[in-house]
Amino acid sequence: MNQALVDAMETYLKAGLAMDVDTLDRLYDPGFENVRVDAAGLTVTLTKEQFMGRFRAMAAQGVKIGESVDDATFPATTDFGDNAAIVMRRVKDGTPVLYVFVWRMEEGRPTTILREFTLDKDISYLLKMV
């Protein structure tokens, strides 16, 4: 288990809870993409600009994305070249949701998030964003 990745994810999750858009903007790589797939096979890819636009709009409206990240677990990490990946599991409305975050690594430390892959029950609500 790469503890530096776990620590970086905890920083990321806390920034999300606080709607700290400056930290989120710094953590997302300029080429970041969020690739989401649901149980029906629907796939939506969001760019950093789309993702950050959503966060900024929510923050401006005072909307939070959650109350806690205590349900987040990190069952696996893997390092490959200048990148590393971490699997995160959460429970949303009683259903497990899996995420894989790919981080850029520099000198063994995670620097920015390159990709977020999300396997969710239903992502049809995201179609209006693309």
Image (cartoon, rainbow, N blue to C red):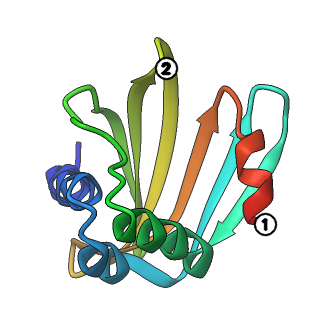
- Element at label 2: strand
The residue lying toward the viewer, choosing from 81 and 26, is 26
Q: Is residue 115 left or right of residue 86?
A: right
Q: Earlier in the sequence, mark 2 or mark 1?
A: 2
- Element at label 1: loop
Quarter of the image with the C terminus in it: bottom right
Q: Residue at x 43, y 62 (%)?
A: 58
Q: Residue at x 28, y 32 (%)?
A: 72
Which residue in the structure is indicated by mark 1? 130
Question: Is residue 120 among what the camera can see?
Answer: yes
Question: Is residue 80 among what the camera can see?
Answer: no
Q: Residue at x 37, y 71 (%)?
A: 60
Q: Position of residue 39 (x, y in %)?
A: 76, 26
Q: Is residue 89 above or below residue 87?
A: above
Q: Is residue 130 above or below residue 127?
A: below
Is disc 2 surrounded by few (<14), some (14 to 19) or many (20+) residues within 10 Å?
few
The residue lying toward the viewer, choosing from 11 and 78, is 11
Task: Give the numbered dot on residue 96.
Answer: 2
The kind of residue on which mark 1 rests is: Val
Residue at the outermost bottom position: 30
The residue lying toward the viewer, choosing from 84 and 116, is 116
The kind of residue on which mark 2 rests is: Pro
- Nearer the observer, disc 2 or disc 1? 1
